[in-house]
Image (spheres, rainbow, N blue to C red):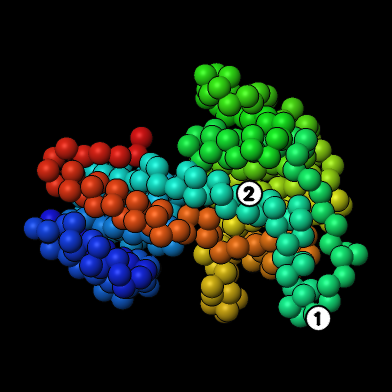
Amino acid sequence: MKILYCYNEDWERDFVTERLTGHELVFVKGTLQEQHELPADAEALSLFVNSSASAELLGKLPALKLIATRSTGYDHIDTNYAKEKGIAVAYVPTYGENTVAEFAFALLLSLSRKICDAYDQVRTTGSFSQLELRGFDLKGKTIGIVGTGHIGMHAIAMARGFDMRILAYDVKENAEAAGRLGFSYLPFEELLAQSDILSLHAPYNEHTHHMINRESIKKMKRGSILINTARGGLVESEALVAALEDGTVAGAGLDVLEGEGFMDNEVALLASEAPQVEDLKRALANQYFIDHPRVIVTPHNAYNTREAIERILGTTCENIVSFAQSRPIHLIP
């Protein structure tokens, strides 16, 4: 097969070339939308979540048979268009369940113990004063895990290590795991009301879009902490701004943001002839989060370890090889 591979780092080329022998590889650096020319005869496309596989761009690849995304989520792909054109979409079902869960707790600990504040204080002023740096223990706190897939389960196991009370919500409850790991499932609104910390690990789809919104935030325990290492679209940005303003949410650790694709190029957004109002609102909200003293924003980095990246690339190559051999694996539902 002729494979169009959008890569981010140079070392990926050798890794992929070694595992995709017998195929014609066309490497392009950067995102799909940054490419001025696309090979019309490409039969497979491999991309990362920073690429937007829109119907318009996919239409420039008429021979395409497979999209192999190097991610678990696939909301960056127009799957309706792919289905209409008979293009298979393969994803990476697991790669960093421990990796992302570890990062969620890194954000939580940074907030609970004011680690970023302490670092900034010492580095910028040289002061070792502890007066403004008092945090809180995780032991005994109630954590609500939204989404008990692979990542959510690892987050639950880590919460046990901190001796926390663990609640969970998922549309598909796992009674065996609940008994084994010692957590309880609750309806969503009850979980919101009881959780000191809310950690999101749900997939993003039409059912979970803005699951944290103005109405659901009203149900949250006042002064709670929100952690999101899943997808930005799970949280209604304007609603979170209001919740931080009125103290319903005391702090947030956000590795993902709504409209984060614009964050690297806000100038282009503002300079466009007809910027969408919603895009502008999200850009303003995201800047508010970045500037807020009780919010930690990181650049969609929860997945980013050496081990996880190699697992992602390895599985992606397996997906492509299996498809070429007419035994496709890891296709989206």
Above or below, comparing residue 320 to residue 287 in the picture = above
Residue to which mark 2 is pinned: 105
Give the percent coordinates (x, y) of residue 19: 18, 56
Q: Residues within 10 Å of mark 2 (few under 14, many from 20)?
A: some
Residue linked to disc 1:
125
Apparent side of residue 89 relative to residue 74 in the rendered image (left or right): left
Most foreground residue, 219 or 183? 183
Please identify the quarter of the rendering in which residue 137 is found: top right
- Are dots 2 and 1 in contact, CB under 8 Å? no
Instruction: Locate residue 315 relative to residue 227 in the image: left or right.
Output: left
**Residue lying farthest to the front in this orientation:** 128
Give the residue type that dot 2 points to: Phe
Three-letter residue code for mark 1: Thr
**Quarter the N terminus occupies:** bottom left
Q: Secondary structure at mark 2?
A: helix
Crowdedness near tag 1: few (<14), some (14–19) or many (≥20) residues, C-alpha within 10 Å: few
Q: Position of residue 222 (x, y in %)?
A: 84, 42
Q: Dividing the picture into quarters, in which one does residue 201 lie?
A: top right
Of residue 215 and residue 332, the one placed in the foreground of this image is 332
| In the image: residue 307, left or right of residue 319 | right
Name the one closer to the observer, 189 or 145: 145
